[in-house]
Image (cartoon, coloured by chain):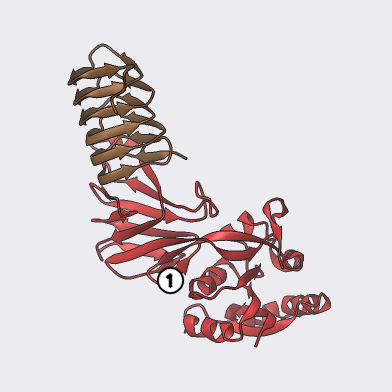
Amino acid sequence: MQSGYTYIYDERLNDRKYDRELMKFEAEISSRGLQGRIGKFAMFRHAKDIVSDIMRDTPHTLVVVGDEMTLLSVIGNLGTAQVMIGFIPLLGEGLLSRSYGIPKGLASIHTLAGRFIEELDIGTVEKRLFVTEICAIGPGISLFVDDRFTIETALEGKIIIRNIGTNADASDGFLDLFIEGGAEKKGFAWLKKTKTETSHVRFKKATLHRSLQGSCIVDGVPVNGEKLEIALQPKALKIISGRRGRMTLAE
Amino acid sequence: MSTVIAKGVKVQGEFVGEGDIQIEGEVKGSLTTKGRLVIGPEAIIVADIKAGDAVIAGRVEGNVTVERKVELKGTANIKGDVVGDLFSAESGAKIVGKITIGQKET
């Protein structure tokens, strides 16, 4: 069945301290004709099943009500489902809301009602989607990039693969790889900071090899695996944005 | 933001950049960009190089083919042929190879 809006509430909104704000929120969306089915979302329990169940009704617009972690977790579990994403940051702002002009709290309903969309690139790591970045720390990290070359650090380093954030544009068709550290520092060399301590390479796909001694975090969630296939789906995520300058009107 | 390979980072294979590239680490294989390539004094390159412009201050083992200007710093040490349209070299730069300027070989 095709429906319009479906809302996913972070289960933390069950706390009674949010009752009043939720009542105001529901009254406002109802008065604007934006009401729809409501589902509860628990980030760390059966997240994939909850999202699959909600997507079964093929909503046109999926509105996440919570904070950035709720949003990233829902998107991460969407699989291949194509849906427009709205965001109501009742539980707090984050990189995405700030980047895409979505105000905190009930003011974000205006953004939702505006229905201006931006198309964002979205990353995949194995079969999971990611929006912001992958951060891998530890020894023995290397990447085989775009089927062309291998890049590795001599020593333990920190590798960030970023889609959205500092020095990364989510609409350029590339992921940005940043490698911090890696150079051996002797004596007082560690006191010196030069602008070339961070490597930067743009790419479209890569295989990350890592040691399980280190850590790997994708959109804030730890992942396992010594070998991770990473790729980019250009303009695959449609998000209702508050940045009017660069947008097209949604259907 | 341009492509940067910092000190302590190694690249092996066919390294192709979209724009400007700065190398302070190691590259083995081949290195290609249509933009400006800057090879720092501690960089080690064992690769054939193709670039729009090149400023070389480090060690290169391989042929260097540049569309426009090749600039060698005093610390440059090249084992290979250099082809370019314009050429400059500081005192102290070392080249073991043939230099062809203004008559690009294809």
Q: Establish if A89 lies above or below A194.
A: below
Quarter containing the C terminus of chain A = bottom right
Spot the residue most to the front: B106
Task: Report the residue that reaches farthest toward the top.
Answer: B91
* Residue under the point 34% across and 42% down: B16
- Pointer 1 indicates a residue of which chain? A
Residue A161 can be seen in this image: yes
Disc 1 crowd rating (10 Å Cα; few below 14, some 14-19, many 20+) is some
Q: Is residue B7 visible?
A: no
Residue A51 in the figure: left or right of residue B24: right
Image chain in brown: B
Mark 1 is on which residue type? Arg
Position of residue A173 in the picture relative to residue A109 (left or right): left
Query: Does A102 appear above or below A40?
Result: above
Q: Quadrant of residue A225?
A: bottom left
The residue drawn where x is 39% and y is 29% is B52
The residue located at (53%, 81%) in the rendering is A51
Per the image, the residue denoted by label 1 is A128
Letter of the chain in red: A
Residue at 40 percent across and 72 percent down: it is A127
Q: Quadrant of residue B27?
A: top left
- Between residue A8 and residue A190, name the one nearer to us: A8
Residue A20 placed where, x, y %? 75, 78
